[in-house]
Image (cartoon, helix red, strand yellow):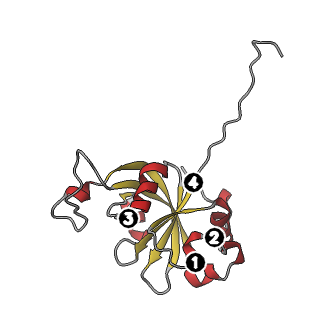
Amino acid sequence: MSEHSIVPLAVVVLMNHWLMKSELDVYPYDRLVEDGSTHWDGVRNYQARNMMRDDMKPGDLILFYHSNTKPPHIGGIAKVLKEGYPDHTSWDTNSNYYDPKSTPESPRWFMVDIEPVMALPMISLPDLRTNPALDEMLLLRKGQRLSVQPVEARHFEAVLAMVGLTTDDVVVS
């Protein structure tokens, strides 16, 4: 090879996977589909905030989880549309998520925008717990309550396999 040879470079796009929890009676996956997209506001946990602010990137896939229902379950797949930006509800005095220590000049809380990718047949928490491929999934750990949490690629794939899908079946535009 000469000093002027062109060497093709492989481009590897790393996609993160997440699980985001919403109560079924507050914001179900069907509403996300109706709305087309939404901003994920109101997260008031520093660890979850840091992931939304620092780690969630456009195109990352999300398991949309319905919590506080019987049974809790995964209802669909969404994707990150816009990476973390200040959560304006934190400085809105009329918002349930108002935080007097957060200002537009010095925001304390962040949110991301998401959009639906595809609905899934219900994958219940009891069914997730019985899948040995998910033994180490964060959601299934005792005491794990984060509303936003990372999901390892192998766990994301195992969840899809529970309803007969692969990552190739998840069409992301």
Of the two numbered discs 3 and 4 in the rendering, the one whose residue sits closer to the viewer: 3
Q: Label 3's element? A: loop
For disc 1, the marked residue is 123
x and y, in percent, of residue 154 in the image: 68, 63
Of the two numbered discs 1 and 4 in the rendering, the one whose residue sits closer to the viewer: 4
x and y, in percent, of residue 74 in the image: 53, 73
Front-most of residues 64 and 89? 89
Q: Spatial distance from mark 3 to mark 4, Cα to Cα?
A: 20 Å
For disc 3, the marked residue is 45
Q: Sequence-wise, which precedes: disc 3 or disc 4?
A: 4
Judge from the rendering whether residue 109 lies leftward or rightward of residue 15; answer left or right.
left
Front-most of residues 27 and 34? 27
Front-most of residues 91 and 32? 91
Circles 1 and 3, Cβ within 8 Å, touching? The answer is no
Residue at the (50%, 78%) spot, across then down: 143
- Looking at the picture, which amino acid does disc 1 mark? Ile
Classed neighbour count for the residue bearing mark 1: other residues with Cα under 10 Å, few (<14), some (14–19), many (≥20): some
For disc 4, the marked residue is 16
